Structure formats: structure tokens, C-alpha cells
Amino acid sequence: MADIKPTTSASAAKPATAQHPKRKGNSISWIAPLICIIVGYSFWRFYLGAPEHFSLPDTDPSHWFWPGHKGPKQTVPIAKMYEGGIIVPLLIGTFLTVLTFVVERYLTVTKSTGKGSIQEFIRKVQFHLANKDVDKALAECDKQQGSVGNVMKAGLRRYKEMITNTELDTEQKILNIQKEIEEATALELPMLEKNLVFLSTIASVATLLGLLGTVLGMIKAFSSLGEEGAGGDAARELSVGISEALFNTALGIGTSAIAIIFYNIFTTKIDGITYGIDESGFTLTQSFAANYK
């Protein structure tokens, strides 16, 4: 067996013109939740908390941030959510954040999946490589237009270079192909997994926020009961207070459930793409080892 040449020779085989796209910043991911919370507060304050939705509106200008409106009118049932307290706009904001990242992840994962079946794409590439037709395999990557196709295309370009390389032995050529695949994979996977952390975090935090709002509402309700005494009005106030507090629970649990469902959907799809990428690397190395010993 030929002597293994220094790794600098393997590195030198990589053309200087080969460049990978730069990673894009992710600042929008931190701006989006802030915007959603602001929108949630605006909806809670100016729509749900509109004075005309209450029989006893609070007109004190000093209460502009959180007016103490009472008696939501039956004509606008959703206005009852306003009396759930200041946790309600936070929960609305987290719900909007979930919707934002669900749409963003759906578009990204759908684009990364590419066109057609990943397994069918790999079978076509395997067929072309078995016939030693690398150009047709590259054409299949252009048609696929997904993360698996991008990784396969990067590997195939190095595969094609290694066919005509006379400086390296077969083992070193395979290592070069593997290295190229690993570099391409390192660029694709972060894009797939980006922003999933927001869905997983909100899945836990939304429930806790809902419970916090419920506890605060219950404290307020029982405080009113203590001040009013044990009469019929006090019991009515307690019932209203509990009803208002449970809006927080409903919003928190609902938001958490949606976040969990879509988080699991996206991770399942990403696992399928990751498996396809792994299978692509295996296909290239095995094909090269079999056809170009």
C-alpha cells in the first residue's frame, strides 16, 4: 500500500475558488418576539380595553397604561379577556410569536426539503454514479434544490476532482470527499435548526405565564371576597374574578399546545432531511471506493 502523504497535500487538493456561502445573521429572531409582545399589548389595551366595551370605563388619564375598566358589555364577549390582567398581553404576544416562527420554520423546512422524494433523489444519484456519469448526478442535485441536494452537490464536485487527481491515494481521496460533505453539512444543519429553540422555550414558558396570571387573578378575586364579606355580591365578584383568571390559563395552555405540536412536526421533518444528508455522504464514499480503487 502506498505511503500516506502529509495532510497538507490533501488540503492543497482543494481549489482556492471553492467558497461556501456566509451564514446570515439572526437578529430578526430576537426582534420578532419584541414586536409580537408590543402588538399583543396594543391589541389588549386599545381593542379589548376600549372604553366603549365596558359599562364602567376608567377615564383617569394617569391609568393610561392599564385602565381599570369594569363591567364588560355582553355585546363584546371577548372584552372579558381584558380583565384577566397584565399577563394577558404577554400571553397574546407569545401566541403571536409562536405563529410567526411556525410560518418562518414552515417556509424554511419546506424549501430545505426540496423537490420530490429524497429517497428517490438518492437512488437516481446512485444509478448515475454506478454508471460513472457524475455530470448527470450533479444535474439531479440542481433539480432537487434542497439541503440534501446542496450537500450532495458539494460532495460530487469534490468527487469529480478526486477522479482525475493523481497525487493522492484512494483513502486520501475518500477523506477529501468526506471532509467536503462535513463542511457542507455544517452549513445546512444550523439553518434547519435555527429558531426551533423559541418554539421549545415558549412551549414551557407559556404554561407558566398562564399559571402566573391565574394565581394573580385568584389573589385579586379572594381579596375582593374578603373586602365585600360573604354576601351575594361578594360571591358574584368571586365568580367573575375566577372566570377572568382562567382566561390566562386557557391562553397559556393553548399557546403551549400549539408550540409543542409544531415543534414535533418540524423536528420530524428535519430528522428526515438529516438522514438523507447522512445517506448522501455514505453513497458518495462507497461509490468512489467501489469505482475508483
Image (cartoon, rainbow, N blue to C red):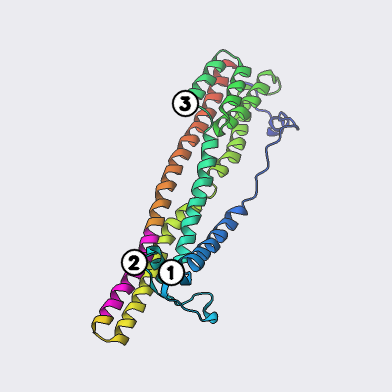
Q: Give the residue at the far left of this rendering.
A: 231
Does 170 sit left or right of 220 as displayed? Answer: right
**The one of 261 and 276 positioned closer to us in this rendering:** 261
Tag shown at residue 246: 2
Majority secondary structure of magenta residues? helix
Q: Circle 3 is placed at which residue position?
A: 119
215 relative to 34, above or below:
below
Residue 292 versus residue 118 in the image, above or below: above
Q: Which amino acid does label 1 sit on?
A: His
> What residue sits 56% from the left and 12% below the top?
131
Count residues near mark 2 (Cα–Cα under 10 Å), then give few for <14, some for 14-19, many for 20+.
many
Residue 267 % position (x, y): 45, 43
Q: What residue is shown with label 1?
A: 53
Q: What element carries label 3?
A: helix
Task: List x then y, in percent, for residue 217.
Answer: 37, 73
Kind of residue indicated by mark 2: Leu
Q: Nearer the viewer, mark 1 or mark 2?
A: 1
Mark 1–mark 2 distance (CA, rounded to whole Å): 20 Å
Characterize the local packing of mark 1: few (<14), some (14-19) or many (20 or more) Cα atoms within 10 angstroms.
Answer: many
Asked if marks 3 and 2 touch (Cβ < 8 Å), the reply is no
Location of the N terminus by quadrant is top right
User: Which of the pair 265/78 is nearer the observer?
Assistant: 78
Specify start and end residues of the magenta stretch as a single range: 234-253
Residue lying at 53% horizontally and 41% vertically, measured from the top left: 107
| Label 3 vs 1, first from the N-terminus | 1
